[in-house]
Image (cartoon, grey):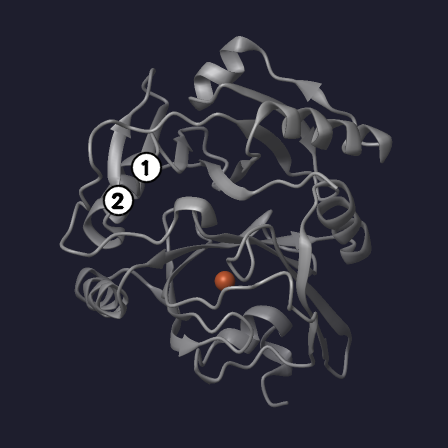
Amino acid sequence: MASVSQLGYVGIGTGDEKAWHELATNILGMQVIPGDDRSTSYLRMDECHHRLELRSNGSDDLEFVGWEVPDPATLQRVAQQLEDGGVKVTPGTRDDADDRRVVDLFTCVDPNGIPTEVFCGRPVNQQPFHPARPMSGFKTGGMGLGHILVYSASLDESVRFYRDLLGFRVSDFTEVRTPERKIRLAFLHCNPRHHSIALLEAPGPKRINHVMFECNSLDDVGSGRDLCLRRGVPIGIDLGRHMNDHVVSFYMGNPSNFALEYGWNGRTIDDTTWQVEHYTSVDSLWGHPQLRELVTGPASQER
Ligand code: FE
């Protein structure tokens, strides 16, 4: 089956673009690229024109997600898979593609209401990427910008969309039982990165829970954490190492009030040998003291 190959870009709506720019440059180490109009700007983290698009519309949520495919033929095949699966697909116009700095794209909506774009042909920026603060850069390339964790009304429907129509493979399923309820998550990959999307079956305050960026060095994570502490950026989940993707990370707040996971040394997946894993807890190998609360809520802290 045809498959998307990486998380290409995300669009974020914000009520405070300036605060985002400060976080992006001073803490994350990204470059700010001005947009075509005053209400749009871009964040660059590698050789691509951008990986994040900021829109000053006050939504403070995920506006759209862009999944890349390797070539125009795959773009057509993925569109056909979606249509055969009953998903309405809208071809992008020339203007849409120009706005995103891509050659071609189509749009659809995922089962959670997230505007979803599938695109091919992303021009590279001729200028080398220089982090805006001293750090060693981001692990992206063919593994995409990182990962997103989004809230899902129905895990089964979402898995069907991402696995059976967009071509993702399941990395693991997590099922956490609390006295009140059962919480399910699915982690899916479309390249060697352990997951490019994770789905949390729960009502969320927003579409998005967090975006993860993978740094090239542990020192980048440690120095980023120091900068958060020094500049008063809230750390929602402190340092730890995840059980499933092995990422060493912490989670910082952002001006749009969801989380950014800043990590290092994620596990990679070889599809020829991977066995889908099953977890009954979200606890980390070490650290991440506030992680369980994120998933199960404060009421289940003592379990
Ligand atoms: Fe994560």
Residue that appears at 24% across and 27% down: 126
Q: Which percent across, then down, holds residue 138?
A: 31, 52
Amino acid carrying mark 2 in the image = Met
Q: Observer-nearest residue: 282 or 18? A: 282
User: Ligand 1 near label 2 (Cβ, under 8 Å)?
Assistant: no
Instruction: Left or right? Give the position of 37 relative to 68.
Output: left
Q: Is residue 53 above or below residue 208?
A: above
Any part of residue 144 in sight: no
Q: Is residue 14 above or below residue 80?
A: below
Under circle 2, the secondary element is: loop
- Farthest residue, direction front: 272
Instruction: Left or right? Give the position of 27 relative to 106.
Output: left
Under circle 1, the secondary element is: strand
Residue that appears at 77% across and 78% down: 180
Disc 2 packing (10 Å; few <14; some 14–19; many ≥20) = many
Instruction: Left or right? Give the position of 18 relative to 176.
Output: left
Q: Observer-nearest residue: 195 or 151? A: 195
Q: Are marks 2 and 1 in contact (CB under 8 Å)?
A: yes
Identify the mark at residue 30; answer none if there is no mark. 2
| Residue 34, quarter of the rendered image | top left
Disc 1 packing (10 Å; few <14; some 14–19; many ≥20) = many
Q: Which percent across, then down, holds residue 194?
A: 54, 62
- Farthest residue, direction top: 94
Q: CA distance from mark 2 to mark 1?
A: 6 Å
| Residue 299, quarter of the rendered image | bottom right
Residue that appears at 71% across and 44% down: 112
Q: Which residue in the protein does label 1 denote?
A: 43
Q: Which percent across, then down, holds residue 22?
A: 23, 44
Amino acid carrying mark 1 in the image = Leu
Q: Which percent across, then down, holds residue 15?
A: 40, 36
